[in-house]
Amino acid sequence: MILDAKIPEGPIEKKWTSFKNNAKLISPANKRKFKVIVVGTGLAGSSASATLAELGYQVEAFCFHDSPRRAHSIAAQGGINAAKNYQNDGDSVWRLFYDTVKGGDFRSREANVYRLAEVSGTIIDQCVSQGVPFAREYGGELANRSFGGAQVSRTFYAKGQTGQQLLLGAYSALSAQIGLGRVMMHENSEMLDLVIVDGHAKGIVARNLITGEITTHAADTVLLCTGGYSNIYYLSTNARGSNVTATWRAYKRGAAFANPCYTQIHPTCIPVAGDYQSKLTLMSESLRNDGRVWVPKAKGDKRAPQEVPEEERDYYLERKYPSYGNLAPRDIASRSAKEVCDEGRGVGPSGLGVYLDFSGAIKRLGEKTIRERYGNLFEMYQNITGENAYERPMRIYPAVHYTMGGLWVDYNLMSNLPGLHVLGEANFSDHGANRLGASALMQGLSDGYFVIPNTLGEYLSTQFGKKVSTDLPEFKKTEAEVRAQIEKILAVKGNVPVDEFHRLLGLIIWDQCGMARSETGLRKAIEDVRALRERFWKEVAVPGTGAELNQSLERAGRVADFLEFGELMCLDALIREESCGGHFRVEHQTPEGEALRHDDKFAEVYAWMFRGENTDPDLVREPLHYEAVHLATRSYK
Amino acid sequence: MSSEATSSKKPCGCCWPIFSSSIGRKWVVALTGIILVLFVIGHLLGNLSIFAGPDAMNAYAAFLKSAGELLWVVRIGLIICVVLHIWFTITLWRENLAARPQKYAVKDHLSTTVYARLMRISGLTVLAFVIYHLAQFTWEAFNPDYKGWVDAQGRHDVYRMVVTAFQCPFVSGFYILAVGLLGMHLSHGIASLFQTLGITSKKMRPLFEQGGLVVAWLIFLGFASIPASVLLGLVKTTPVLPACPLCH
Amino acid sequence: MSTMHFHLRLWKQKSGTDAGQFIEIDAKEIPSECSFLEMLDIVNNRMTREGKEPVAFESDCREGICGTCNMVINGVPQGPGRGAACQVYMRKFENGQTITVEPFRVGAFPIVKDLVVNRSAYDRIIRSGGFISEHTGGAPDASTTLIPKPVADAAMDAAACIGCGACAAACPNSSPMLFVGAKVTHLGILPQGQAERKSRARNMVRTMQEEGFGNCSNYYACEAVCPANVPASVIAMLNREYIRGELSEAVGAID
């Protein structure tokens, strides 16, 4: 099988324009005949639903939350990139494009990334018009800050709550359309399967989480905007509900899953404190502007940080990367923290932590300035850990934050399954092997506001007169399969809570498919995941019934999918015998311990195709052609 | 919980929506509140003439009486204000009760003030007092003798009537209690009306709250000073029989 | 790590139509470092192991921003301290303390199960006007309109609302005016929001009433519990905006 990315001809700067000039259009009179199902109402889903409804399509949107406003896009702190060059610091669409390709360690698709950079500016225009209260200068202009991996200030922000404000902007646009009756919103509805009719994605099966009712919904096309799968690690910065179920079920119905091993580990999170822990909290990357990262030079040094003299401290980032120092990119900073902890020099009760020390900055700038800059973060840290970071260094440790992998899509954001479109973090397309800060919000909104409204016609124009109804046997059969899966979970009647399996799975994946991966570790992880899955189906405890609000049942379904997905993730990591971005294979490193890419063999997308239960999936490769940029080694020394 | 589910209650179409709306009715309560506060302040200033002696007070009372029809315009206006103030408060309150069908098992007052929580009690007590107060001094229902009291200039001797009445500790006690509740009512009410009419800000609110408290205290002290002075013997009149029906 | 124990009284109610009651649980050996919701996770998992149905409660991001979690802890909506219930840590409680956990008691938020309530009324309020009608692609360049920093900051303070419902839950009258006022203020003070300013306030307040919420008595309990620190001055703004909107409609002024 060949995966055709359908990239338009022409020079990279002209591709999107030429696409739009030649794209197939659906007339306003015909748009209202087409029904679009949108699953997920985060940045991508809300913006797509609102925009498609404005254009005249009939939209049915689904979210498992009680309101579309709860999606986890809301938690993004830092900001959103856009090549506006309001600062006159030399930014351009090209630079944003290049930084993103380089930041992704040359494993993303050029044409998609260029388009992302190209529409980035209009996203800001759109959001400002909606009333998103971006930070302003005293003169009233929009303010910008700088972020990792870039030498220009192109990040727009709204306090430390940019994701919240952008999501609420998209949510309000969606709400307006719901109010006008153009979007039918299904809250508390979790998609449990995709319905395929004649090889095309034509509907979904959903479960109402309040009543337990299982319903089928038919449409002309389905848009999955269901986010990433970081929660496979159990502990991540993602919301508790974030899951892989929608994309995984689509995979099992024929959609290719691309690069599942590409996950991003954020270096500055509050360390794990114990088994009971349900969630890891991110501390903004901006802290590394003034904090210095260190561990004691000696192994097992249990002294309080204040008692460790200066000469016995190892400021390892400054030592290893003198030019970037504490501001080394996320993947590198994370891996370095892991290395020192593996050497037994980690701090805190668990030994899995490093210090982020502000004492120098406080001495230099005064506590008042530090309080002004980071007061809310210090407060948050104190609330969670009970420690005062003005008096003793913070303890931080990396945590899983984002997943670059996702369902494979072409330039039109359609997967290999005709009719199935995938937007936002749920697809694989724009970030390669590592995502730069402030790029996730940009991608979600670009896909929803500006890309899909233009590309959807390519598919829908082939679908005149092909309406399907939920009376078709395909719908009945899929619904029956969903019911059977739920019955199967309820029938186990074991005595081990779902959370316990999820936690154990997280430990396996974190240890073997986390910051550093090895062949033996990955092989072992695959075995362990299989064994855990077997145990799950014998011992999981799900009290209650399927015909009511049953949170154990919801989680069990999601964890069952994670238990299958984990195997694919490890397999992908095993096959990719190189180190790139967030994927670090210990066998492939430079003598200095830096990531070693093998562009000759691996400059390609790995897309996995389901072939059946307990059967190895098929691997389909999409070669990545770099015509506009030259492959280069990332160096931050 | 699907989005189609909407409530059946529609805003009343037959009357001006402002008067059926939550905020509109509160505006009426606030605006009538302003008028009533101004009345209370005016009334207090008039009453304080007692400290200037019988002549001043009786002259003031005679001046009011001379207003004739105008006095009735004011009285009717005040009655309308009182009725609207109370009526809209009651309709709002009934909705508030209905909005929480089941109470909390554990109650925490959070930052609500005792004045705010006692608004209805203080308001209704003040209403009862006002009726009593009118019966005592305006209708002179408790002691028909009052009607015949005139001073040297032939004016109604309001001074003697008031001082006589306040010589009774029960009358004074109830009066002080009532104006105390009035003060409490106003301490929330005055600050609150700025919020309801939307003429406050984050910065101004503490000022209005403290200002409301100060005005409320001044009003309380002003009113309470009269019976207190009478009881303490600072304000005196020719000794007569106690007039209070309770004391007989 | 030290452990603590608590005496819990948790609200259990099978569905909105069933009667509910408190169940009493002795929660032993709770790590003192864990959060309130993690304590409930532990209790729920113990109940699950014993074959009992756990207590349903909502949560998602667990970092205080999504607004999903909602419960009343010892009479305080979203629990002691600033922030949502997920930001409450057990070290704030005394060892051996009795902790009562109830759902939000607001008629317009009917109980779904245990501690879970239906807050869709808030979505319907937003749908009736809490937006700027701006169709995608029609926006002028973002730098076209200058917005003074104090205005942008004030809009942000109001826009920070997480839509959790604690304001209505804390209000003795079950009034959501802090929520409605936050949106009316956020959009009403920005230049982009002027076109629909009057109709927005009018329509959102009307929907608020149709949903059966109570009326504001300026108690400020909402402000005291708001996890997002939304100031009650937004209610003053709402009061002003609404009357303006209603009056201009009544006299036939051009909106």
Image (cartoon, helix red, strand yellow):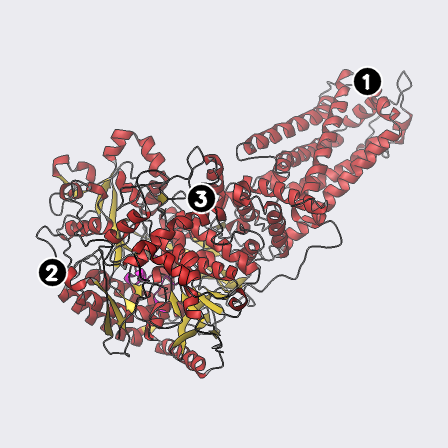
> Looking at the image, which is closer to me, A92 or A500?
A92
Q: Which percent across, then down, holds residue C56? A: 44, 63
Q: Which residues are magenta?
A: A225-245
- The numbered mark at residue B54 is 1
Name the residue that disc number 3 marks: C142
Q: Which percent across, then down, holds residue A314? A: 14, 41
Helix or strand or loop: what does disc 2 sit on? loop
> Looking at the image, which is closer to me, A594 or A182?
A182
Name the residue that disc number 2 marks: A587
> Looking at the image, which is closer to me, A166 or C140?
C140
Q: CA distance from mark 2 to mark 1?
A: 107 Å
Identity, as a three-letter code, of the amino acid under mark 2: Glu
Chain holding disc 2: A
Depth check, mark 2 against mark 1: the one in front is: 2
| Residues at circles 3 and 2 in contact by the CB criterion of under 8 Å | no
Q: A197 left or right of A352?
A: right
Chain holding disc 1: B
Chain holding disc 3: C
Depth check, mark 1 against mark 3: the one in front is: 3
